[in-house]
Structure formats: structure tokens, C-alpha cells
Amino acid sequence: MGKRIKDIVPEYKPITDFLRGKASIILREVAEKDKVLIVNRNSRPQNVIISYKRYTELLDREKRDNNG
């Protein structure tokens, strides 16, 4: 069995945090701490932001699953 991606505990942020100039801080934190961030708009999940590292791990896992 392949490497298990660590358990995902998402964090939620409203879109207004991005509109108030906090985007660079939020994105840096996602990358440095390998967070999964769900962005809410009108109190509903709109987007998911993950680190590039996590994204490449998911792609690698998908490739292995599809070729195995």
C-alpha cells in the first residue's frame, strides 16, 4: 500500500479575509504549515486551498492508483 496522506483537518476562512488584504498571510501559512483551507462565501464552502506539496502528493497518488 502507498504512502498515506496525513489526516485532513480543514480550516475555514471567509472570503472577506482575502478581500481585507490578508491573502498573502493566509497563503503563506497554508504553504508553510501544509494546511487545507476551505474558503466560505455567503457562509457556504466555495473553494479549497492546499499547499503545492500536498497537491503534488495527491497527483502522484492518483497516478499510482490509476496505473496499479
Image (cartoon, grey):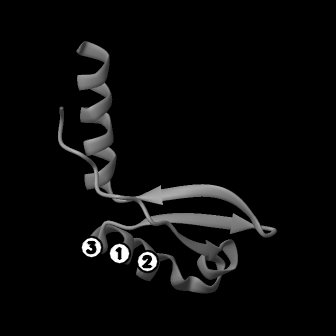
Dot 2: element: helix
Answer with the quarter of the image where residue 56 lies: top left
- The front one of 29 and 4 is 4
User: Which mark, residue 64?
Assistant: none
Of residues 68 and 49, the one nearer the viewer is 68
Q: Which mark is residue 24?
A: 2
**At 35% from the left edge and 58% from the top edge, which residue is drawn?**
7
User: Which residue corresponds to mark 1?
Assistant: 28
**Residue for badge 3:** 32
Q: Residues within 10 Å of mark 3 (few under 14, many from 20)?
A: few
Q: Are marks 3 and 1 in contact (CB under 8 Å)?
A: yes
Quarter where residue 28 is shown: bottom left
Of callouts 3 and 2, the N-terminal one: 2
Cα distance, mark 1 to mark 2? Answer: 6 Å
**Where the C terminus falls, by quadrant?**
top left
Q: Are marks 1 and 2 in contact (CB under 8 Å)?
A: yes
Please state which amino acid type lies under the numbered disc 2. Answer: Ser
Residue mark closest to the camera, 3 vs 1: 3
- Tell me the CA gap for discs 3 and 2: 12 Å
Real-space Cα separation, disc 3 to disc 1, in angstroms: 6 Å
